[in-house]
Image (cartoon, rainbow, N blue to C red):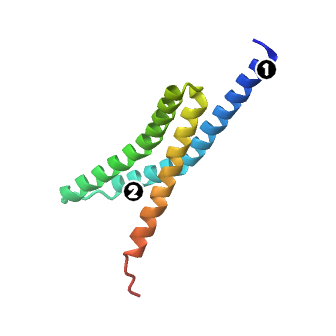
Amino acid sequence: MTDSAAETARRTRRTVITFLVLTAVLLLPLLAGLWYAADDALQHRSATDWRANHQTRKSLEHAAMLLVGVPLAGAACGWTGATVLGRRTGVATATGAMLGAIALWILGIAAFYIAFSNATFDF
C-alpha cells in the first residue's frame, strides 16, 4: 500500500470507530431506561391481573425491538446505499447506525412531548 492509501484507510477506520462509539453513547441511556422499566415491571407484577402483566410485557418487547431494530435498519440502509453507489461500506454503515440512534432519540422526545401534552394535571 502506498502512503496515501494507508492514510485513507487509517482515516476511514478512525471515522467508523468514532461513529460507532457515538452510536453506543446514544443507545446506552435508552438501554438503561429499558432495563429500569423491565426491572420495575418485574418487581410490581400483579398476582391476579394477567392482562396488565401481558400488556406490560408486550410493550417492553416492542420497546426492545425498536431499540435494536432502528439502528440495525439504519446500518442496513447505509450499507445498501453504499453498495449500490459503489462507495466504501464501512463509513456508510456506521453512519446509518448512528442516524438510527438519533432517530430513536427524536421518536422518544416526540412521544414524551405528546404524552405530556395530552395529560391533565389536577392539583
* Amino acid type, residue under disc 1 in the picture: Ser
Q: Residue furthest right?
A: 3
Along the polypeptide, which appears first: circle 1 or circle 2?
Answer: 1
Q: Residue furthest top?
A: 1
* 3 is higher (above) or lower (below) than 88: above
The quadrant of the image that shows the C terminus is bottom left
For disc 2, the marked residue is 40
> What element does badge 2 sit on?
helix
Identify the residue at horizontal 52%, vertical 39% (top origin). 97
Identify the residue at horizontal 64%, vertical 32% (top origin). 16
Identify the residue at horizontal 44%, vertical 65% (top origin). 112
* 107 is higher (above) or lower (below) than 112: above
| In the foreground, 112 or 48 | 112
* 23 is higher (above) or lower (below) than 106: above
* Amino acid type, residue under disc 2 in the picture: Asp
The percent position of residue 84, horizontal first and vertical second, equals: 49, 27
Is 2 on the left or on the right of 19, as rendered? Answer: right
> What element does badge 1 sit on?
helix
Q: Residues within 10 Å of mark 2 (few under 14, many from 20)?
A: few
The percent position of residue 23, horizontal first and vertical second, equals: 57, 42
Is 119 on the left or on the right of 71, as rendered? Answer: left
The percent position of residue 44, horizontal first and vertical second, equals: 33, 59
For disc 1, the marked residue is 4
